[in-house]
């Protein structure tokens, strides 16, 4: 299987249907089917959602909606704007007026809470945008959220956030671009989960590891592109349980980079990445510029 080459100015590759995938499959019903928020004015909507004990939550560019998990019915009063969601969680209108994009949401069964993330975009493409992160007050997403935010770097635009969670913390990955709109680096932000679950969420103890692009093939500090923290709901995790971050190899889509993470606050460190071949592919590394969010 091959992947199309990402040209400059394109952040995401189009999907291509290969011949072995062109086949009919039996109709299968898995859970409830919901009528998602289809009237988002943003393209792409960056569709994202998660399932909790009694609800399904859809979080897309411009919209936040909650559904009854059993019936698939959207709850009264939804969808609301994503800016309304963040404002109700404590993010100022001053920050939200910059524009928002790239929604992420998941339910963490270990803490029995929902987590969400999104970036501001400054619309003009200016660097120094913010990353917002929040958590629900209970396992019922209708019972309110609390959120906070941080600026990754005053000289970078933090784009395409990823979101992961395990027993120790919350992982956010970003692809970073400079003021000339060129690929500059990738960052992994590690946030102690207990800090976000506090009465007033805090990111003061976050640890950031940034790797400059282009990354040298085989280098000990290489982590790959579009860093994704692995969500781990296994019981029995302790502070000595390592986390994991995976990413496509910067120099070729035929490899996956895996980086172990040691949780030792407040000086958590990301260990050396290891690479696992996933087969021969055609295609190059990540785009050299971004276009939109």
Image: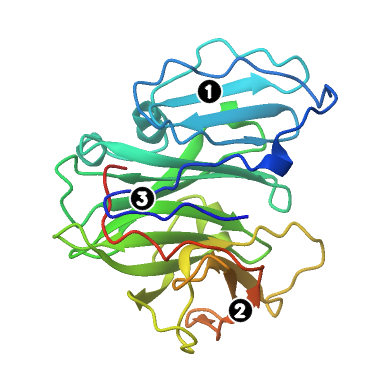
In the rendered structure, which disc, 1 or 3, sits on the residue that comes first in sequence? 3
How dense is the environment of label 3, judged by Cα within 10 Å: few (below 14), some, or many (20 and up)?
some
Q: Nearer the viewer, mark 1 or mark 3?
A: 3
Which quadrant holds the C terminus? top left
Q: Nearer the viewer, residue 10 or 121?
A: 10
Q: Are marks 2 and 3 in contact (CB under 8 Å)?
A: no
Which quadrant holds the N terminus? bottom right
Identified at 39% across, 62% down, the residue is 286
Label 3: element kind: loop
Which residue is identified by label 1?
65
Q: Which circle marks residue 262 in the picture?
A: none
How dense is the environment of label 2, judged by Cα within 10 Å: few (below 14), some, or many (20 and up)?
some
Report whether residue 262 is seen.
no
Report which quarter residue 210 is drawn in. Answer: bottom left
How dense is the environment of label 1, judged by Cα within 10 Å: few (below 14), some, or many (20 and up)?
many
Which residue is identified by label 2?
275
| Image location of residue 58, percent across then percent down | 56, 29
Label 1: element kind: strand
Q: Nearer the viewer, residue 252 or 229?
A: 252
Which residue is identified by label 3?
11
Position of 182 compared to 14: left or right?
left
Q: Are marks 1 and 2 in contact (CB under 8 Å)?
A: no
Position of 22 compared to 267: left or right?
right
In the rendered structure, which disc, 2 or 3, sits on the residue that comes first in sequence? 3
Q: Is residue 241 above or below residue 293?
A: below
In the rendered structure, which disc, 1 or 2, sits on the residue that comes first in sequence? 1
Identified at 44% across, 73% down, the residue is 251
């Amino acid at each position: 299987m091959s992947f199309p080459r990402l040209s400059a100015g394109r952040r995401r590759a189009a999907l291509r249907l290969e011949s072995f995938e062109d086949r009919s499959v039996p109709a299968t019903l898995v859970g409830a089917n919901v009528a998602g928020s289809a009237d988002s004015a943003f393209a792409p909507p960056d569709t994202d959602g998660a399932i909790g004990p009694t609800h399904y939550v859809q979080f897309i560019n411009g919209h936040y909606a909650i559904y009854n998990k059993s019936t698939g019915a959207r709850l009264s009063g939804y969808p609301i704007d994503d800016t309304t969601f963040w404002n109700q969680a404590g993010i100022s209108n001053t920050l939200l007026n910059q524009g928002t994009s790239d929604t992420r949401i998941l339910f963490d069964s270990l803490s029995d809470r929902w987590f969400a993330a999104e970036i501001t975009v400054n619309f003009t493409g200016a660097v120094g945008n913010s990353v917002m992160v929040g958590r629900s007050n209970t396992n019922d997403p209708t019972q309110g959220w609390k959120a906070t935010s941080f600026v990754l770097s005053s000289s970078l635009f933090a784009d395409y956030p990823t979101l992961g969670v395990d027993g120790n913390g919350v992982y956010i990955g970003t692809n970073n671009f400079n003021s000339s709109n060129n690929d500059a680096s990738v960052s992994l932000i590690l946030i102690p989960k207990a800090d976000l679950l506090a009465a007033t969420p805090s990111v003061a103890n976050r640890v950031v590891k940034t790797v400059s692009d282009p990354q040298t093939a085989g280098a000990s500090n290489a982590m790959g592109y579009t860093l994704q923290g692995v969500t781990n709901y296994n019981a029995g995790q302790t502070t000595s349980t390592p986390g994991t971050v995976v990413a496509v190899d910067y120099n070729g889509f035929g490899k996956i980079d895996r980086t172990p993470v040691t949780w030792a606050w407040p000086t958590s460190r990301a260990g050396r990445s290891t690479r696992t071949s996933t087969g021969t592919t055609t295609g190059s590394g990540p785009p050299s510029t971004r276009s939109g969010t």
